[in-house]
Image (cartoon, rainbow, N blue to C red):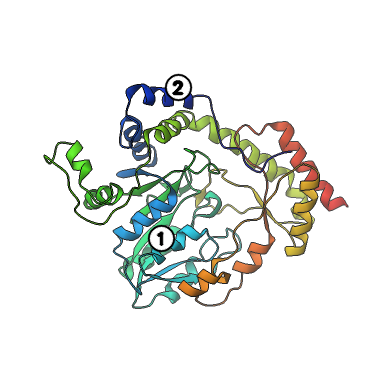
């Protein structure tokens, strides 16, 4: 059986976990937490990168930092994970879903401005599959309407819009280090931002509403509860595991890209024959091989395709069910405009196995099994 995903493991992680244990500093904000933050700041060219317990929690922190409140509106695509919306719903905001582009599955930047109302406070682009949204028009709309931009870059580590890292262009950006992502700490994430004035508040939110970070830097003689916060700081064991992956990131990325390119070349003929559609990478985007998906004719074809591959030992899976069609989506939000592509394209999309260390034999088996399906 070829699994859909196997969490990356390089062999370097155990060394750093043992080091963390020996230093007897297991709670967060120790040496490995700081190393990871500094590495992201330097590698991604962002002023501040705070490690969090998940991308969900990074999004929740971003929602608090935007001062979103009851009945404020947030514009986002419906084709995303529930955390994108939940982070703002729990602050009382209303979600305004807009349609996606069929080529990238990303928020259609051409539809955003029409969704802006006097209650709009935030635009939330989601960089699907590590392929960037077209950010210049989105940032321009935000600037002209005095809105904030929060990037959901959960899948976007080492992906770029032109020469800018995903997560580093908006007011806040959120990364994921879940076990399904290119790099992992099991569960984990990061909050990225450029403004120095956000740092103190972000640290307070992450440290359960206390000014504990200032205390440990020697800026105050004791720490206390000063504002809202929660436990968003991961342990040193998680950070040590992630540090082991950061030290090997080029090897991991190169391996994933080999699989992505192999798939993309192998399925060109099937696309030309009209059996499927391959991913589209716009000229402004440099992606990270987070995911390889195909789009089939319709939902029935996809259902048969997934079952066919599974019977032959290949695990392929579909992805999000559009949020606006869910009970919570209807309760907490509304769809602005026409759902021309969101539902239709979501029902066609299927993801193929792609993980670090997959190997050429497995790549070839996946490709051959896909081709066999269209010959039956």
Q: Position of residue 161 (x, y in %)?
A: 46, 51
Q: Position of residue 44 (x, y in %)?
A: 39, 41
Mark-to-mark CA distance, 2 and 1? 35 Å
The residue tagged 1 is 87
Task: Mark yes or no: residue 125 visible.
Answer: no
Task: Give the structural element (helix, strand or loop) at label 1.
Answer: helix
Q: Looking at the image, tell me whether mark 2 or mark 1 is earlier in sequence order.
A: 2
Q: Nearer the viewer, residue 110 or 220?
A: 220
Q: Which mark is residue 240?
A: none
In the visual, does 341 lie left or right of 40? Answer: right
For the N terminus, give its image quadrant.
top right
Q: Position of residue 162 (x, y in %)?
A: 45, 49
In the visual, does 116 lie left or right of 354? Answer: left
Determine the residue positioned at 63% across, 47% down: 292
Above or below: residue 50 compared with residue 12? below
In the visual, does 340 lie left or right of 151? Answer: right
Q: Quadrant of residue 74?
A: bottom left
| Outermost left residue | 221
Task: Give the structural element (helix, strand or loop) at label 2.
Answer: helix
Determine the residue positioned at 61% across, 54% down: 280
The residue tagged 2 is 15
Determine the residue positioned at 37% across, 26% down: 20
Q: Position of residue 178 (x, y in %)?
A: 50, 44
Cβ atoms under marks 2 and 1 closer than 8 Å: no
């Amino acid at each position: 059986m070829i699994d859909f995903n196997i969490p990356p493991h390089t062999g370097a992680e155990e060394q750093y976990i043992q080091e963390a244990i020996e230093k007897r500093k297991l709670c967060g904000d120790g040496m490995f937490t700081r190393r990871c933050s500094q590495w992201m700041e330097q590698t991604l060219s962002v002023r501040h990168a705070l490690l969090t317990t998940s991308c969900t929690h990074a999004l929740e922190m971003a929602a608090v930092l935007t001062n979103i409140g009851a009945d404020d509106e947030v514009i986002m695509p419906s084709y995303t994970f529930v955390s994108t919306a939940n982070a703002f719903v729990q602050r009382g905001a209303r979600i305004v879903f807009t349609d996606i582009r069929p080529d990238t599955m990303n928020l259609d930047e051409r539809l955003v401005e029409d969704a802006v109302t006097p209650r709009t406070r935030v635009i939330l682009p989601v960089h699907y599959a590590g392929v960037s949204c077209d950010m210049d028009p989105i940032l321009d709309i935000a600037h002209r309407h005095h809105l904030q931009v929060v990037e959901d870059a959960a899948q976007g580590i080492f992906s770029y819009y032109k020469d800018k890292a995903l997560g580093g262009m908006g007011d806040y950006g959120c990364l994921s280090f879940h076990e399904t992502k290119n790099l992992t700490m099991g569960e984990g994430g990061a909050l990225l931002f450029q403004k120095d004035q956000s740092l103190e508040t972000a640290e307070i939110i992450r440290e359960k509403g206390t000014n504990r970070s200032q205390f440990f830097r020697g800026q105050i003689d004791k720490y206390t509860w000063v504002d809202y916060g929660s436990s968003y700081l991961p342990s040193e064991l998680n950070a040590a595991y992630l540090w082991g992956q950061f030290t090997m990131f080029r090897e991991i990325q190169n391996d994933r890209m080999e699989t992505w390119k192999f798939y993309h070349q192998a399925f060109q003929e099937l696309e030309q024959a009209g059996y499927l559609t391959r991913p589209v990478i716009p000229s402004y985007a440099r992606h990270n091989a987070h995911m390889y998906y195909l789009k089939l004719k319709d939902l029935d074809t996809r259902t048969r395709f997934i079952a066919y591959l599974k019977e032959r030992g290949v695990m392929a899976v579909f992805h999000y069910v559009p949020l606006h069609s869910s009970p919570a989506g209807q309760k907490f939000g509304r769809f602005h405009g026409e759902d021309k592509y969101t539902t239709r394209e979501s029902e066609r999309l299927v993801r193929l196995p792609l993980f670090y260390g997959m190997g050429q034999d497995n790549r070839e088996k996946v490709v051959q099994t896909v081709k066999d399906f269209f010959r039956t």
